[in-house]
Amino acid sequence: MGLAAKRLDRRYVLFAAAGLFIFLLVIYPLWQLFYRSFFYQGGFTLQNYQKVLTQPVYYRALFNSIWISLATSILCMVLGTLLAFVVVRSDVHHKRALRTLLVLPYSIPSFFAAIAWIQLLGPQGYLTRVARGVTGWESAPWDIYSAGGIVFVMTMHYFVLVFITVGAALERMDASLEEAARASGAKTHRIMLEITLPLARPAILAGGLLVFIGAIANFGIPALLGMRARFFVLTTSIYYALSIPDFSLATSLSVMLVVAGVIPLVVQWVLQKSEGRYMVIAGKSVHPAELKLGKMKNAVFAITVVFVVLISIVPMVSMLITALIKYWGAPFAPESFTLEHFNYILFLESGRRAIRNSVILAALAATITMFVGTIISYLYVKARVPGGRFLDFFGTVPYAVPHTVIAIAAILAFARPPLSLYGTIWIILAAYLAIYLPFAVRTTNSTLQQIHDSLEEAARVSGAGLGQRLRDIILPLTRPGMIAGWILVFMPALRELTISILLYSHRTETIGVIVYNMHDAGYSEVAAALACVVMGLIIAGNAVIKKLTGGVAGF
C-alpha cells in the first residue's frame, strides 16, 4: 500500500507541475486577454468592441481578413485538389519527386516567401523586368503590393495543406465503388467527377479550413505586401494598435481574430459528425486504379513541372540571386556577384546577436516543450491519471490560437509584477513555449501510443519505481520520436516572426525580426543573405528529421 501511495503521489506531483506550466503559459495569459478586452480606462465597458465594429478602419480590417482568407481557401482547394489528383491518382511521371517539390514552399517561412515574390514580381522584380523587356510594357499589369498580391502569395504558400490532405484521402480510398462504376461502362472522367471527387469532399473541405485558419492568422505576408498599400487585416491592425500603443484596442482586435479563427473549427466539427456517409476506407488492402492519361501524359507532366519550378525553385533562386548580387538592379554579369552581403550580416553585431538569440530561444523552447510534452502525454496515455485529458486538451489549445493573439496575451500576463518579463528575451521564450507546446504534446502522444503497456507493467511488477520505468523503458523507446519532435519545434522557432516582432526590444532581436526590418528598411540584399542562411538550416534540419523518422516526417 505504501509503495502504491508513493507511486500515485509521484504521478500527481508530475500532474501538478504540468498543470502549473499550462496555467501560467496558456490559461492565465488567454484569460487576461479576454478579461482585459472588456476594460477601458479602468472601467468595464463594451467600448473597445464598439470601436472595432463602428470605425471603418477596423471593421474593414475584419472584413479584409475574412474575404482574403476565403479567397485563398477557395483557390487552394481548387489548386491543391487538382494537383493531388494528378500526382496521386494519375500515371504521371516521377510522382515522388513532384510530391517533394510541391511540398517545399510550405517549409519556407511565409514572410520569406513574400520577400521572394516581391523580388520576382515587384515593380523592379526579375520576372517583371523580363516581361517588360519582352512585351514593351512601361509597367507590369500586376501589383504585388495589393490585396490580389496577398491572395496570390498566400495561395502559393498554403495550397500544400489541401494537397497533402486530399492526397492522403485519395491514397486510402476504397476502390470498389470506382471498379463497380467502371464495370458498368462508366468513363474515367465521369467516375472521377461523380464518385471520386464527391467522396474526397470532406478532405477537400478539411484542407480548405486549415488554409482559412492559417491565412487569417498570417502576419508576415499582409505586413510586407499590404501595409505599403495601406491595406490592413486584423493581424496588421493589431501590430499598429501596439505601436500607438492602445492595448485596449489590441485586445479587442485579438478576441475578434480568435473568434474568426474558431468559427472554421466549429464548422469542421459539425462536418465531422456527419462524415459517416463518406466512409470509404475499408479494413483491407486498397490500391485505387490510376487514371491513365494516355496522349496527355507528357503534356500534363510538362505543365506540372513548369508549375513546380515556378512556385518552388524560382522563388528560392531569386532569394539567392538577391543575396549574391552587389546591388538591386545590377546587370547579370560575373562582376556583379559577391559574397559581401553574407559577410556583412554574419559579422554585423545585430546580425550575430539575432542568430545567437534565435538559436538560444529555439533550443530552450524545443527542450522545455519536449520535456513537458512527454510528461503530459505519459500522464494521459500511459499513467491514465484522472485529469490527464484536461492537460492534453489545454496543452494543444494554442494550436488553434493565432500567434499574434498569443503575443498580446503574453504582454498582458507578463508585463507587471510578480511576473514582469516585458522587455526581456524571456517573454519571447514564454510565448514560444505556449505556441510550440502542442507540437511536443502531439509528437510524444503518438510515440507513446506505440509502446505496449505490457513493457511498463512487467517493470512495475518487478519492483521498478516510476522514475526507473521512465528512465529505463519509456525514454529510451521514445527517444527517436522525441528527437524528431525536438527538431520539429526547433526549426520553426529558429525563424519565427509574428511573436518576435511584437515582443522584441533592444538587444532581443531574432532572425525573423532582423530579416523583416532589413527588408522593410530597403536592405533587401542583406535580408536575402540571412534568409538564405536560415533556409539552408531548414533544409538540413528536414534531412535529419527524415532520417530519424524513416521518411515519415519532413518534406
Image (cartoon, helix red, strand yellow):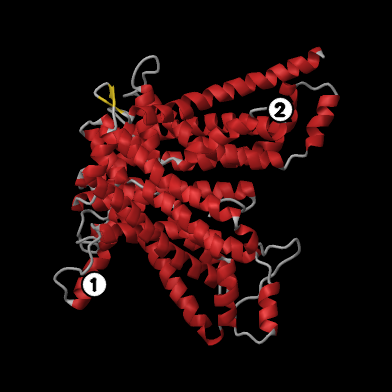
> Picture coordinates of residue 283 (x, y %)?
75, 61
Residue at 55% across, 55% down: 271
Q: Nearer the viewer, residue 536 or 382?
A: 382
The kind of residue on which mark 1 rests is Ala
For residue 152, side relative to residue 486 (left or right):
left
Q: Are marks 1 and 2 in contact (CB under 8 Å)?
A: no
Check residue 470 in the rendering and tell me which mark sits there, or answer none: 2
Q: Nearer the viewer, residue 504 or 332?
A: 504
Q: Residues within 10 Å of mark 2 (few under 14, many from 20)?
A: some
Q: According to the image, label 1 marks what residue? A: 131
Q: Is residue 285 above or below residue 23?
A: below
Q: Residues within 10 Å of mark 1 (few under 14, many from 20)?
A: some
Q: Is residue 234 above or below residue 26?
A: below
> Picture coordinates of residue 549 (x, y %)?
63, 48
Residue at 60% across, 41% down: 443
Q: Marks 1/2: CA distance?
A: 62 Å
